[in-house]
């Protein structure tokens, strides 16, 4: 994995080789591809006009086509991952985000192990892998800490409601909890 390598045939695309000054235009073009509101040839025409305004040579139709197809596939994969993640969180319930964070962390660890085992990482790739792993571990710790704090807060609220209900005859703890949810949190039960 050298600095000038990409997936596929291993060469940088014409878009990847544009100078740094073209970055805002590349971002614009990617947004247009992502939104799928404009035809690809219209995006290319506008993109090349924007590049020309900066004094940068345009991108050929064939180079753009290859680049746009690659990006469309990446966008579809990202959308699918987001959909699956949303479904997983919904199906896992209140602890879903924590469990998903742990699952993603374990997937990152597994993939990094596979890359290391196969010798597919150079020094820079190894450093980036170490950062990804550290970020994953930090996310797992933060998620667990957040969950712990929420559970502690829930316990304190429940204890406070029980104390009020015990000390005031005629106060229904369930009704008090319902009122707190409605007044404080805006949660209404049907």
Image (cartoon, helix red, strand yellow):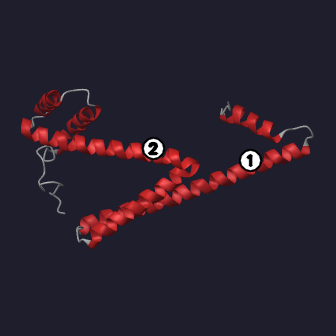
Taking 138 as reference, is 84 above or below it? Answer: above
Q: Is residue 60 left or right of residue 37?
A: left
Residue at the far right in the pictured view: 169
Percent position (x, y) of residue 104?
42, 57
Any part of residue 137 in sight: yes
Q: Earlier in the sequence, mark 2 or mark 1?
A: 2
Q: Which residue is mark 2?
A: 86
Foreground pick, 155 / 123: 155
Disc 1, SS: helix
Residue that lies at the very extreme toward the front in this rendered image: 91
Q: Which mark is residue 121?
A: none
Q: Closest to the observer: 58 or 66? A: 66
Question: The C terminus appears in which quarter of the rendering?
Answer: top right
Q: How many labels were placed on the picture?
A: 2
Q: Quadrant of the N terminus?
A: bottom left
Q: Secondary structure at mark 2?
A: helix
In the rendered image, the vertical position of residue 116 relative to residue 105, given as above or below: below
Q: Quadrant of residue 8?
A: bottom left
Identified at 84% across, 38% down, the residue is: 172
Tag 2–tag 1 contact (CB < 8 Å) = no
Q: Position of residue 134 (x, y in %)?
A: 41, 63
Task: Count neighbours of disc 1 (C-alpha within 10 A) and say few if under 14, some if 14 to 19, many if 20 or more.
Answer: some
In this picture, residue 96 sits left or right of residue 84 = right
Please identify the quarter of the rendering in which residue 61 is found: top left
Q: State which quadrant residue 145 falls in.
A: bottom right
Q: CA distance from mark 2 to mark 1?
A: 29 Å
From the image, tell me which residue sits under label 1: 157
Which class describes the residues within 10 Å of circle 2: few (<14), some (14-19), or many (20+)?
Answer: some
* Horizontal and vertical percent position of residue 65: 12, 38
Residue 118, percent from left and from top: 24, 71
Does residue 26 appear to the left or right of 52 in the view shown? right
* Mark 2 vs mark 1: in front: 2
């Amino acid at each position: 994995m050298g600095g000038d390598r990409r997936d596929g045939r291993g060469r940088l695309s014409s878009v990847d080789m544009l100078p740094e000054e073209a970055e805002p235009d590349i971002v614009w073009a990617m947004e247009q591809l992502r939104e799928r509101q404009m035809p690809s040839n219209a995006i290319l025409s506008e993109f090349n006009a924007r590049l020309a305004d900066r004094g940068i040579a345009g991108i050929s139709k064939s180079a753009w086509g290859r680049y746009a197809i690659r990006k469309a596939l990446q966008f579809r994969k990202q959308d699918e991952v987001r959909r699956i993640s949303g479904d997983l969180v919904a199906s896992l319930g209140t602890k879903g985000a924590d469990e998903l964070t742990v699952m993603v962390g374990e997937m990152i660890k597994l993939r990094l192990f596979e890359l290391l085992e196969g010798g597919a990482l150079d020094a820079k790739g190894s450093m980036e892998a170490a950062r990804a792993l550290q970020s994953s571990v930090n996310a797992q710790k933060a998620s667990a800490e957040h969950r712990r704090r929420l559970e502690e807060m829930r316990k304190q609220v429940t204890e406070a409601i029980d104390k009020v209900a015990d000390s005031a005859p005629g106060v229904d703890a369930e009704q008090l909890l319902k009122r707190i949810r409605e007044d404080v949190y805006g949660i209404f039960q049907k």
